[in-house]
Amino acid sequence: MLRYAVIGNPITQSWSPFIHQQFSKQTDIALSYEAVQVEAANKSAFQTILQQLSKKYAGINITLPYKRWAFEVLKTHHRLSDRAKDAGTVNCITFANANVWLGDNTDGIGLVRDISQNLGWHLQGCKILMLGAGGAAQAVLPAMIETNPICIDVLNRDLSKAKAMIEPFKGAHCEMHCLDSCGKISYDCIINATSASLWKELPSTIDTLHAENTYCYDMVYSASPTVFLQWAISQHAKATSDGLGMLVEQAAESFYQWHAVMPDTKIVIEQLRNQLF
Ligand code: NDP
């Protein structure tokens, strides 16, 4: 039986084993998928761990805090998809053989599929505000640009990070600006890619922001609406969603990379939502 895993630190909270087991049942593809805690002090130690994992698993997903190191190891020694090159991080590795590993990033396509296919929000021609300029924001930015919005503004406390993040996309077909505070511009869609909701906080940058008639998406997911989504509802947002669908869609794209079969995600999103309560 082919073996897969998700690695990170911490990892006990990961829903990836549950999601991949549901995909396996649904598609009749026999596999095992486990969560593996990895403790690597530096990139070189992480590379050694990847070599060990490559002997045991056909593929792995990578979560915090190792997505950037995975990118750097694969950039130097192996192959990267265009999506991973644009994202600067890797969340999915296929171990084709001992010498050929392919690194990919499925977060961006996961977010866009959730927004466009599951939620039915149309981003083409929209003004988008991205909150945050960390790893998740960077990973999804190329896929967001591909949806053909009019503009994407990136609002982050640390303006230098936002500037560095959009630099490679200068000349893209949508306008992009960096902000460290927001005025009174209204947006069609706000994506919260900060980690503030994990600490039950609103992003500190949104004090003057309005969200009336705006699609509001929080990448963080939880059983009850996050603080950001509560704020959006109080602002009369057009529609709101947390990031549970993104989690399942990015997993589905990994599953597709490994098995060339796209699972039904809607049913798994529902199952997972029930598990969260
Ligand atoms: P990082 O630590 O790389 O980045 C965190 C970002 O949040 C930074 O831009 C930081 O700003 C900002 N931030 C944190 N706290 C606040 C605050 N109180 N007010 C304003 N800005 C704040 O994290 P990631 O980018 O990797 O992840 C971001 C979130 O996305 C996480 O919560 C993660 O759970 C979620 N995620 C969800 C996925 C899914 O499938 N649903 C997939 C990937 C991530 P600054 O730079 O100024 O410090």
Image: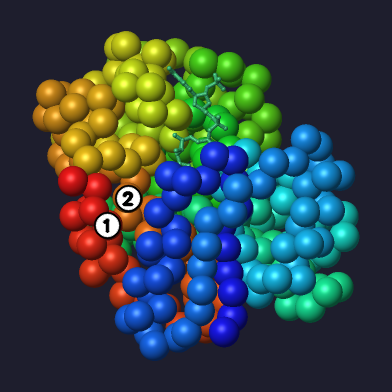
Q: Nearer the viewer, residue 153 or 242?
A: 242
Q: Give the amino acid at mark 2.
A: Leu
Q: Give the amino acid at mark 1.
A: Leu
Residue in view at x 65 percent, y 53 percent: 90
Residue behind mark 1:
272
Residue in view at x 52 percent, y 83 percent: 260
Q: Residues within 10 Å of mark 1 (few under 14, many from 20)?
A: some
Tell me: is circle 2 under 8 Å from ligand 1: yes
Is residue 233 rendered to the left or right of residue 206?
Answer: left
Residue in view at x 39 percent, y 88 percent: 28
Q: Do the residues labelled 2 and 1 touch (CB within 8 Å)?
A: yes
Q: In which quarter of the image is residue 197?
A: top left
Q: Tag 1 or tag 2, which sits nearer the N-term?
A: 2
In front: label 2 or label 1: 1
Q: Which of 97 and 185 is in front in this view?
A: 97
Q: Quadrant of residue 3?
A: bottom right
Percent x, y of residue 36: 59, 54
Is residue 111 rendered to the left or right of residue 212?
Answer: right
Is residue 19 rendered to the left or right of residue 39?
Answer: left
- Let me know if residue 77 appears in the view: yes
Which residue is farthest bottom? Answer: 28
Residue behind mark 2:
244
Residue in view at x 45 percent, y 50 percent: 14
Percent x, y of residue 145: 50, 50
Using the numbered discs, state the Cα–Cα distance from disc 2 to disc 1 in whole angstroms.
Answer: 8 Å
Q: Which mark is residue 81?
A: none
Percent x, y of residue 219: 38, 41
Q: What element carries label 1?
A: helix
